[in-house]
Image (cartoon, helix red, strand yellow):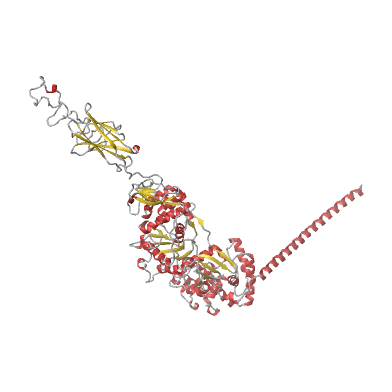
Amino acid sequence: MADQSQSRMQRRQQKKQDKQSKSKWNWKRILIIFAIIGGVLFAGVAGTFAVWAAGAPSLDAASLSDPLSSKIYDREGNLIADLGSQKRTKIEYDDIPQVLEDAVIATEDARFRSHFGIDFQRILAAVWANVTEGFGAEGASTITQQVVKNAVLSQDKRLKRKVQEQWLAMKLERKYSKNDILTMYLNKIHYGNSTYGVAKAAEVYFGKKDLSKLTLPEAALLAGIPQLPNVYDPTKNPEKAQERKNVVLDLMVQHGKISEKKAEKAKKVHVNELVVEDYESDIPYGDFLEKVVKEVKNKMGDEVDIYQDGLKIYTTLDPKAQKQVELLLSDSENNPLRGYFNNEKLQSALTVVDTKTGEILALGGQYNGKEGIGADYNYAFQDGFQPGSTMKPIMSYGPLIENKKRSTYYQFNDTDHEYSDGTDISNWDNSYRGWNTMRYHLAYSRNIPALKALQEVGTDKAAEFAKKLGLPVDKYNGVYESDAIGGHIEPNTVQMAGAYATFGNQGIFNKPHAVKKVVMGDKEIDFSEEPSVAMSKYTAYMISDMLKDVVQYGTGTAANVSGLPLAGKTGTTNGNQDAWFSGYTTNYSIAVWTGYPKTSDSLEGKQDDIPKLMFKNIMQHISQGVETKDFVKPDSVVEVGVEKGTRPAKLPSEFTPEDQIINELFVKGHEPEKVSEKYDQIDPVRELKAEYNEQEKAVDLSWNYEGEVEKIKFEVKAGIENSDLQVITNTENQQVKVTDIRPGSKVIFEVTAVHKDDSENRSESKRVELEIPEEEEDPDDMLPNPEEGEGDGQEGGDSQEGGDSQEGGDSQEGGGSQEGGGSQEGGDSQEGGGSQEGGDTQGDSDGNQIENPLDAA
């Protein structure tokens, strides 16, 4: 038993040892496997890095020292600007003053003189800062790396590019001296305001071509700008630039380049005191090229630098149009509109686009602005303004035609009206014009009809319509009713020129653009925009046809160019702070704005004519020698003659006078069908007869009518011979009984057929005369009455007051002709009877019996 127990214990110990041995062996295996994997990965990464490094571009003196310029061409392929050569000035190391070198090294790369192209200490610090403060908190690129990046590498942030950058930086350090590398850096770096190289920046900002004359504040500013060139541009953001300058001064103190005292003195100098305002760039067409730069950046992103990536940029520029635009926005004595700009705060901007393609042919950003890209604010596309009545075709009449298929004849009543919230709206002249056509109201820019049109179609449909035309309609706020006359949506001239071009392009919208394509090495990027259908052809044509009237006889006559089929619309805002004119032909669309962008001043005198006059001048200039076709009426539109004043529209009859017929446009299938009867010749009555009924002392009057009797009523007049006839009734019947006729008179009756809907439309009158016989005397009436007083004519006899006869008259007070009886003084009818005193009609609803119509008889 003891042997068996010992054997069991031995077996247990052996198992335990085996298990421990196996466990140790497993961990060793795992570590070995990880080591192998790590080695493979390291080899792979190293190999990848080696491949990337081997594939890095070569370093050559030209790419490192000379600017790799981008060339810009006009629409015909002619070179118009070489940005690299025009915005750089190359310097040598000896040209760099010590104060500038100290400022740059202290700011960008404090260990520049000691590292070998890569600063590992700075890399670790950057990693820690990015972990603790967030990604992007600090960069680790040395000056050497920035030279490589700016000279031969793209701006993307991929790992491959970073590896190549570090590899080339080390190669650069082995090949060139620190002085050479610093010079390369200062020749290539971007300084904002579209300027590259420190020498050019000193000239642009301070007016200094000699770097040795730079002061400490100026050197500090130049050292600080490259970190964020557009943010720290002192011409655009002076306060940000001031803050950055002071940070550089602190860094110079920190690294022992200047004393605290010098730094404090330099901080007191504001950048506004340093920057000059009279620098003139040698780059032409600055306002237009500003748009080009923006489009390239928007399309290609930050990976491409337009000034140093050697791009070939093919634009839509028409130099002929651009030069004329620049003339009209200059203070030149040759500017025919110079006299209108008598207030230095007054500004203007405009855009010319190709109607068919949306290509921007010319662009002017401000009046009397500085030359050069980014030199000043560009009002043509950097901001928008209240458009006033130029929105009426876009917000009101365009959507109404598109969605409701209304005609150009469609009627609006220009009268007292309100917005849906109860707010009053008035016309620009504080008057009303009553009922009139859409064409009329648009030509004369009436506000109330425009609001009614928007209310009829609805703000949602208006917003949808405006968005398709490229206008900045906010998806949350949409369209307000006030936008019918220029409310809260504020487009710029580029957007308005594009929107109006759509009307002239049969409803096809092309987004306005200044760049056709960009060629970068062997890669070509197409910038053309895909056209879209913004509206029906019938809407585009009908709006264009009405806008022709604006320049021919409406509010825009000052913009009209004789011999050109053109359309356009004026616009002014409340307070007359802004004025617009947007117009177009089948070739060109131009939008012009003039106003006070930063003040509440109002346009005075004829300043609100500036947009119209600019439009006329430019349109006339660029249209010379160019065939301008008229707008083409599509098959979906029909032109129809309409009788004036009919509501709804009616066709003229054969009797409508020519001067009462106007031609208007209708969407096919929605033209009027009913014919107006206003001027129809109504058939006269026939067989007019009058018969006297002696027993009833009445006249039976009858006639026949052979026309459309359901549209006719009959006016009956009566009177005695040699007196004016008076209306005794209007009836739909063809017979009348006239009662209580005085015997012994000659009575004249007249009957006229009158149209029920138009009392002025009447037939020829028919008359009939009738002799009423005298009554025969009753012999009994001649016998004396013994109960009466003596004598026939005594008081108290037959002629007593209240008797049958009254002194001086046949009827007595309270007798047969009393108020409410058959006849009334001065008229043919009685009060409460058929006709009012002196009136035209008598109450004969059935047309059967008229009592005592002839009191004078």
Residue 774's quadrant in the figure?
top left
Residue 767: x and y in percent read: 24, 38
How many numbered discs, if any? 0
Q: Vertically, is 396 above or below 127? A: above
| Quadrant, the C terminus | top left
Residue 730's quadrant in the figure?
top left
Residue lying at 30% horizontally and 34% vertically, measured from the top left: 734
What residue occupies the far left of the structure in this picture?
790
Work out whether residue 746 or residue 126 is closer to the camera in this orientation and state it.
746
Residue 596: x and y in percent read: 39, 62
Work out whether residue 120 or residue 21 is closer to the camera in this orientation and state it.
120
The answer to whether residue 424 is visible is no
On the picture, is 704 further left or further right than 358? left
Residue 365: x and y in percent read: 44, 65
The answer to whether residue 378 is visible is yes
Work out whether residue 550 or residue 477 is closer to the camera in this orientation and state it.
550
Q: Vertically, is 789 above or below 39? A: above
On the picture, is 467 further left or further right than 39? left
What residue occupies the far top of the structure in this picture?
786
Residue 736: x and y in percent read: 27, 32
